[in-house]
Image: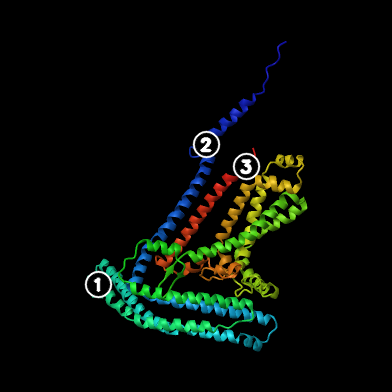
Amino acid sequence: MPSAPSTALPPTASVGDALLNRNRFRFLGLTPDDIIKYFFNGNAVVAVVVLALITIFLFREGAGFFGQSLRDQRLYRLAGLEYVDFIRHEVDDHTALTRALNESRLAQFNKLTAAGKTPEEVNAALAPFDAFAGAFGDTIEDVRGILSDLTDAATAIKTKEQINGDHMVQKSMLLGAGRKDEADKVEIKPVDFAAETAILKSTFPAFQAANRQFATKLEATLATAPVMSDAKLQAQIDKVKVRARALIRSLPHIEQQMQDWKYDAPVPASRALTSFLFGREWITASFWQDWYGIVPLFVGSLLVSVIALAIAVPLGISAAIYVSEIAGPKEKNFIKPYIEFISAIPSVVLGFFGIAVLGTALRWTSQVSFLSWIPGFPMSERLNALTAGCLLALISVPTIFSLAEDALNNVPKHFKEASYALGANRLQTIVRILVPASLSGIISAVLLGFGRVIGETMIVLLCAGNRIAIPDFTQGLGAFFQPVHTMTGIIAQEMGEVVKGGIHYRALFMVGIVLFLLSLIINYIAQRIVQRYRISIG
């Protein structure tokens, strides 16, 4: 007897019906598959468009900086400010030596006070040094007086040209509004730069005479330098003597520069770019001359980042290795949430902690007598690169820890099992197998931690000290205990005070462009390193 036909549909029929029913549904003519595809493609397009808009905005706002900077530097030469600055640099070099003596005196005062000396005993011990420092500071007074007079004269020349510039803008606006009669009343008096700067140069013989007196007085003062019982203070005096004699040897060169100077010498267009990329001064809102050199800001950002990574990389990677390969379940459940919780703390709160607690604690520690052998101890400032670097290390540890742990967990288990089968112990397996196999991920973790550090704003703004100067690296490790300013900090601090479209406004956008390009370079290097050290785990 023939069997009854089966009523069950083949599996392919049910799948086909489902696909057919799914394709029947349409929204604005799109199937569900089309909607999903266009949704994710749209997100990618939005990301690309936003990145392009940010790039265009940065370059549009910052591009005008170089033209404005070039005009400023040409006026700087025409008005004779450059001529006067030959003398100013000489005075500034002497002032820096005087400041170094004062800082050494303060450090010695704190050391003797911490040792239990009374103020009378401290002053008596430092009396020879004070006499030398006072005489040293007075040697430059004649040159400083000439500098003051020339500063007033050059400022007057610059002011005349700036007034002319304002009148030209006013006249152009009146003509554009059709008010020709009023525009004709705006008076513009051309500045005779040849005659004006000739007056400045006429003072050269007096400056030359004052320079000779300065050199004679300085040599005589150096000959009376005291011999101090404290070796560290004596070393500072010897260093100042070497630098002071170098200053004396540079005086003929300064005089020669002043004689060769010409107000109408052309200023190359490249000067605007080189003064920004290689300039060592960031001076704004100055009555004299504004300078926008990024070097001190870049060095400050780099120094703080190096300190942060020197602390965060060992801690983050070590914690990741411990949690991934050594810790038990209870330890993992305790350690991992607490490390990751650090990233939830607002950076401004960490900044307050740095000001109120960490900076004070580090400074107090530096004043302990048995640590005086460390360069830069005792610290003169509680807010410095070290304070900011320690806090930046704290916020970068969760990033490095999480990514490094993921990289270690992604190493196939048979790598570890094969290592144990060959007789390796746990330490050998971690060092020789797991870390090399996950090296690309660990390097990515470090670089992302670096990006987190160099882009941080509030902590460095509150805790780095905000001194716009290149640290004195001749002090060795002492450079890490000096106040610095950073690229992100300067943008946050000054952006609210600038006039839109002005040179200062555009200079801050140029700093932003440098940060933007720096992030691209870091990512490119990260990709190359990852490709270089990638190990096949297939």
| Residue identified by numbered label 2 | 31
* Type of amino acid at the residue the image marks with label 3: Ile
From mark 3 to mark 2, how far is it between C-alphas? Answer: 41 Å
Number of numbered discs present?
3
- Residue 339: horizontal and vertical position, in percent? 68, 57
Residue 405 versus residue 219: which sits nearer the camera?
Answer: 219
The quadrant of the image that shows the N terminus is: top right
- Residue 350: horizontal and vertical position, in percent? 63, 66
Q: On the picture, is 509 further left or further right than 452?
A: left
Disc assigned to residue 535:
3
Question: What kind of element bears circle 1?
Answer: helix
* Type of amino acid at the residue the image marks with label 2: Thr
Disc assigned to residue 183:
1
Q: Which of disc 3 and disc 1 is earlier in sequence? A: 1
Q: Which of disc 1 and disc 2 is earlier in sequence? A: 2
Question: What kind of element bears circle 3?
Answer: loop
Q: Which of disc 2 and disc 3 is earlier in sequence? A: 2
The reply to whether residue 65 is visible in this rendering is: no
Crowding at mark 2 (Cα within 10 Å: few <14, some 14-19, many 20+): some
